[in-house]
Image (cartoon, rainbow, N blue to C red):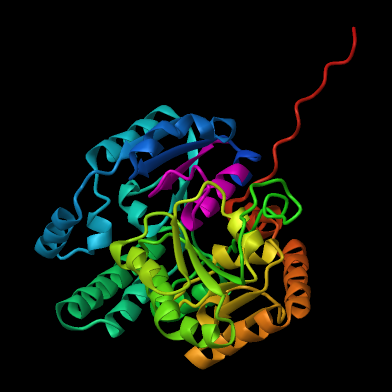
Amino acid sequence: MGDILFLTHRIPYPPDRGDKIRGFNIIKYLSARKRVHVIAFADESRDLKRKNELAPYTGNRSIIWRSKPRWLAAVQALAFRRPVSITAFENGPLQEAVDNILARHSIDTIYVYSSQMAQYLPSKPRQKVIMDFVDMDSAKFDAYAKTSSGLTSWMMQREGQLLLAHEKAVAARVDASIFVSEAEADLFRERTGAKRVYAVENGIDTEFFNPAASFKRIETTGALIVFTGQMDYRPNIEAVTWFVDTILPHIRVLHPQARFAIVGRSPTDAVKALARQPGVIVSGEVADVRGWLAAAAVVVAPLKLARGVQNKVLEAMAMARPVVASAAAAEGIDHKDTIHTGATVGEIAEAVTRLLDDPVKAMALGQAAREQVIARYGWDARLAALDSILGLTKKAPPMRRSAA
């Protein structure tokens, strides 16, 4: 039996954002069954020093700096009629790393994590190939096009069309296409006609995300409403901007001391500017998000555009926090009415206000959410589907030698 080569668009360590969390836990799961080699990009200088932290779960690890400027990727994409988000990940050293490991090791499975990495597959792979799309990126850009105008709308529409063609071509070449939710898998089947499409959902570490665990607590006064996420990501930017501009003022009429904390790395200038609004906090990157979640009276996820399973929602549920989310943000999660959902300004504002009015009910809702996550979203349970998709069995423990 051969090894697994895991190709990913971003080194999955530390597991502190959605794509890294899923990637890390998949590697950890697969490593209990086979030896896993990882080739990944780094887009932050500190991530170039992280590869040894993956050593307990991997064999060889190659971390390649992704240095191509966005403007150059756009020019090349326009010149060669390719998606910008694929051209941005073209990289000679990474291709050499892939060729080298395939030549030197017995690899029987290539696990491709995100469609940008499919360009590094051999033209005629001898290995089983698993394509983990996670979400349907072409659908995301279609949605961007509908909410943009002018040249931006045209670029988003172009990207969506070219990505759809790319996704269809990749799905036709691989042995299995994986998505993070059944809804995403159904959408992919519908738009591409692809076969061998599976849903493998995200999980959550409920021992780590546990309100009873040991972590630094946040001191706060007044009711705290919290949003967590990568704050240079367009759907997150749009969500917090919408909340601050149109929803928070309604809440503060009845709860004038309520504050809204935007917690996450790399806030854009537009996000930082929101801190000038009454009651708004922009934390920037934090070492441990659990302190903010534990301090929250309510966690919100008012995303207008959301694909798949939102880790931010699972984390809040695991921390026994009451959650108010848009229907899109809650769609991929089996929450059994433990999340309040809304589509309009009024619906979301009213849901948050009701929870702030009734802390006992809010606490009960949060506890029910944690119980649901424990029952439904352990990582081993969520990733078990990979065993049949990849044809894997767990490694037997080493045999103990009997005494002479």
Q: Position of residue 224 (x, y in %)?
A: 59, 69
Q: How many labels sit on residues?
A: 0
Judge from the rendering whether residue 332 lies leftward or rightward of residue 123; answer left or right. Answer: right
6 shown above or below 75: above
Q: Viewer-proximal residue, 99 or 30?
A: 30
Judge from the rendering whether residue 398 lies leftward or rightward of residue 286; answer left or right. Answer: right
Q: Viewer-proximal residue, 185 or 67?
A: 67
Q: Viewer-proximal residue, 22 or 127?
A: 22
Residue 25 forms part of the magenta stretch: yes
Judge from the rendering whether residue 136 lies leftward or rightward of residue 155; answer left or right. Answer: right
25 shown above or below 144: above
Q: Give the range drawn in magenta.
A: 1-28
Location of residue 34 by image quarter: top right
Q: Which residue lies furthest to the right in this view?
A: 403
Note whether residue 226 is visible: yes
Location of residue 158 by image quarter: bottom left
Q: Where is residue 318 in the image (x, y as percent from the top left)?
A: 69, 62
Residue that appears at 49% across and 78% down: 302
Please state, as top left, top right, bottom left or bottom right, where the N terminus lies in the image.
top right
Q: Viewer-proximal residue, 353 or 342?
A: 353
Q: Position of residue 226 (x, y in %)?
A: 55, 68
Q: Which residue lies furthest to the left in this view?
A: 79
Q: Which residue lies furthest to the top in this view?
A: 404
Residue 321 forms part of the magenta stretch: no
Residue that appears at 45% across and 33% down: 51
